[in-house]
Amino acid sequence: MKYDYLIVGAGLFAGVFAQRATAFGRKCAVLERRNHIGGNVYTENIEGINVHKYGAHIFHTSDEEVWEYINRFAAFNNYINSPIAIYKDELYNLPFNMNTFSRMWGIKTPGEAKAIIKKQVEEADIKEPRNLEEQAIALVGVEIYEKLVKDYTMKQWGRPCDQLPAFIIKRLPLRFTYDNNYFNDPHQGIPIGGYTKIVEKMFEGTDIYLNEDYLEFAQRGALKDGTKIEYDKIVFTGMIDEFFGCKYGALKYRSLRFEHEILDTDNYQGNAVVNFTGAEVPYTRIIEHKHFEKTNSEKTVITREYSLAYESGQEPYYPINDDENNALYDKYQSLSNSRQDVIFGGRLGSYKYLNMDQVIRCALDAAAKEGL
């Protein structure tokens, strides 16, 4: 079996690269250690509802080329991401905007909101934020930090905010308009029919081998059934440190656990995304999937999302891009530069948190560099 590219992983980066390579007449094989394609954007139809099995994926972009490209594979609805935050018995709109401030302080105008935040920031007297806690207070004041940032962030990262770097929250959205649209990008929505159908189309003409771990394959020199595969180049979307045998040590990640439940009601929480910002609730959010596509079903499917410390054997979802891990990644990146036969991509291959449109952009650029 001879291929131009052996693609490791069957997520979005892999799908885009495979599509471009196949369009140029190249032959690709994909090794995927899970039992399905799609990576973390995989959706499964349950009770007539397209369930995002690995957390909510809301497509948004300002990149016109990426938007044109993804629309070749699916029509998108006009879903606007407008999360709700629940703190104890209080409910707030996200991102932080005039609806949030009005609910919290009983005010109506931007001037009133700015005055309250300014007073709280001045009283905190933080000149040079040294950590996430100080950075957040310097941006939004003490009350919003205490109710909507502090415990939620601790649940997400597994550490108190005063032990987290300030950069994590430097771009905290803060608007003085009555606008609950979380993203500023001109294009956003959910693919009608789910993300899996998109990736299936991208992989047309590609040989896919599921339940195949690349590291085990490389050690055996063959697939599980003994089939030998020859290839000219590797496209690697797994963990870059594992590719090099963790030569310099293991990079750190955060993981997630998803608890899916089918409920005998047509509407559980009235919104697709509800964040729980208090420490008394163990999960970070509940996703109600039918609201993404406004599915007409007598039942609903919800997912409780728990943030976890990553351990070997779990799924790594979020790179921990602090100074220590970024310095470690730089060593692996230097190693990768010496491997002209390998293209590293995706969140794990580049050790970078990437939105879906950024993954597509990186994959298109990688393909273009190959002349595809």
Image (tube, grey):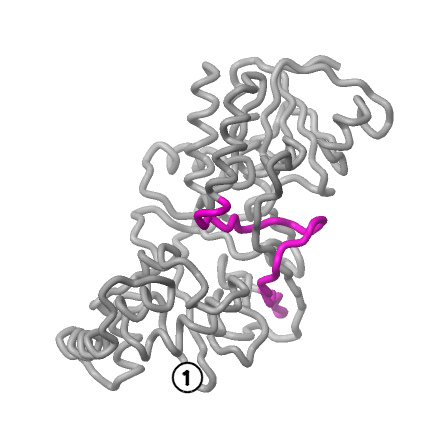
Quadrant holding the N terminus: top right
- At which x and y percent is residue 113? 19, 76
Residue at 39%, 56% (x, y): give it.
168
Position of residue 147 relative to residue 340, above or below, is: below
Extreme residue in the right direction: 225
Frontmost residue, 154 versus 180:
154
Could you tell me which residue is drawn at 65 percent across and 72 percent down?
Answer: 263
Is 157 part of what is drawn in magenta? no
In the displayed structure, 206 sits above or below 287; it is: above
Residue 230 appears left or right of 90: right
Residue 145 lies in quadrant: bottom left
In x, y percent, where is residue 226? Answer: 86, 23
Q: For mark 1, what is the residue?
A: 90
Which region of the structure is painted magenta?
A: 297-325
Circle 1: element type: strand
Q: Quadrant of residue 222?
A: top right
Does the magenta segment cover residue 323? yes
Q: Quadrant of residue 30?
A: top right
> Going 49% across and 74% down the picture, which residue do you hit?
276
Residue at 67 percent across and 23 percent down: it is: 29
99 on left or right of 42 = left
Q: Is residue 96 left or right of residue 87?
A: left
Q: Establish if 169 lies above or below 89.
A: above
Q: Nearer the viewer, residue 181 or 47?
A: 181
How many badges with numbers are in the image?
1
**129 or 202, which lies in front?**
129
Residue 99 position, x and y percent, is 28, 75
Local crowd size for mark 1, using a 10 Å CA cut-off: few (<14), some (14–19), many (≥20): few
Q: Amino acid at mark 1?
A: Glu
Image location of residue 255, percent across then percent down: 60, 55
Tell me: residue 7, above or below residue 369: below
